[in-house]
Amino acid sequence: SSGINAEYGSHTQLGGESRVRGSFAMTHSRHKPLLNVSDQRPSRKTMLTALHLRAKTRLSAVDFQDVWRHYDTDGNGYIEKEELDRFLADLFDAQGQVISKTDIAGLRETLMDCYDSNKDNKIELSEMAKILPVEDNFLLKFRLQQRPLTYANFLRIWEHYDKDGSGQMEMGELSNFVTDLMGLSQNVDYTEKEMTSILLDLVTHFDRNKNGLIDKSELLLLLQVPDNFLDFFGLYCNLSKEEFSEIFSHYDRNGDGYLLGDEVTELVADMMRKVDFDLSVAELEKLSERVTKVLDLNADGKLSRAELAELFFIGSRSG
């Protein structure tokens, strides 16, 4: 079980250019070439249709991770213009097809129109999964975020696998979780006997109250969820301006000077965790929306440093 824990806490290393190209080749091997080599200027519709041919063969979680990390060269969690161009060129090259820079630019524009749902001119993980379909694995999107697992995302994972909402993972639920967890690190099909052994080993190491089940606090340890950042600070009403600034910067993940969406949710989740107040994911998201609405004085849908300061009583005193 320590091996399982270590695998989740670390990032799979790339197997080199050949492995990434191998993933492409495997994905397309059962289909005709993406484009005819005689096509000099294929239309965008033709290219997009050709790109969809490989949708019948889904990549494993391991192969998808390799592809994603190979092309997200700066590790910022997005595939941007130059990275996407290289991805498209390699995708066609893996099938022995030559595509011009002009055609790459046209296909990139078409892909953005079809898959860039938030129109930020870059491809994020969920959007790439639609371009290169991947086998279902709920844990994959959290593994590829290039940062430690947040408590808010931990709650999403917990609710996904605790199907009956009992507050404990029974063996069937735990088996589904472990299957996805192991699928992040290796393409291996385990026998029923091997899976039973893995489950028993996991329960032995992490079932602290010895009831034969895994509860929320035990899964926290298994997934190595970091300590609550807010536990490093005292009462909110006693924060200095410097401490508040440190908190704001921690949750402002992209450094744009605002808290928005999941950033607010992560902060609120840690605030609830600090006072041992248990919320469902739906309740947490509803509360986060409420906090944003109340504090968002200029109604721009995000919280500035000054707006969030009101939640911590910073604006009402000299600091």
Image: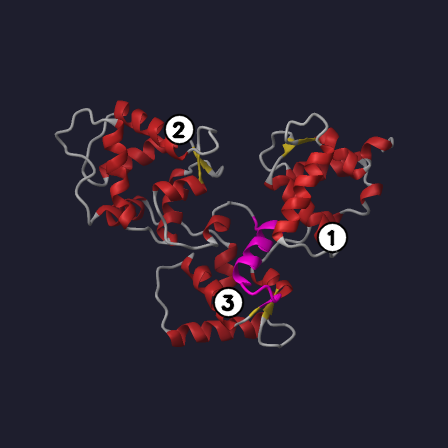
Q: Position of residue 209 (x, y in %)?
A: 65, 74
Residue located beneath label 2 in the image: 81
Q: Can residue 213 be spotted in the picture?
A: yes
Q: Quadrant of the C terminus?
A: top right
Task: Determine whether label 3 and label 1 are within 8 Å by CB.
Answer: no
Q: Position of residue 221 (x, y in %)?
A: 61, 62
- The amino acid at mark 3 is Glu
Q: Is residue 166 above or below residue 234?
A: below
Q: Which image quadrant is residue 291 in?
A: top right
Identify the residue shown where x is 40% and y is 74%.
194
Q: Is residue 183 magenta?
A: no
Q: Position of residue 218 (x, y in %)?
A: 61, 65
Q: CA distance from mark 3 to mark 1?
A: 28 Å
Q: Position of residue 129 (x, y in %)?
A: 39, 44
Q: Is residue 187 above or below residue 84?
A: below
Residue located beneath label 3 in the image: 173
Write down the region rendered in magenta.
148-168
Q: Which mark is residue 274?
A: 1
Q: Nearer the viewer, residue 62 or 299?
A: 299
Q: Which mark is residue 301?
A: none
Answer with left or right where residue 284 lies relative to residue 43: right
Q: Secondary structure at mark 3?
A: helix
Q: Is residue 164 magenta?
A: yes
Q: Earlier in the sequence, mark 3 or mark 2?
A: 2
Of badges 3 and 1, the one in the foreground is: 3
Badge 2 density bin: few <14, some 14–19, many ≥20, Cα 10 Å: some
Q: Earlier in the sequence, mark 3 or mark 1?
A: 3
Q: Which image quadrant is residue 36 in?
A: top left
Q: Residue furthest left?
A: 38
Q: Is residue 212 above or below residue 228?
A: below
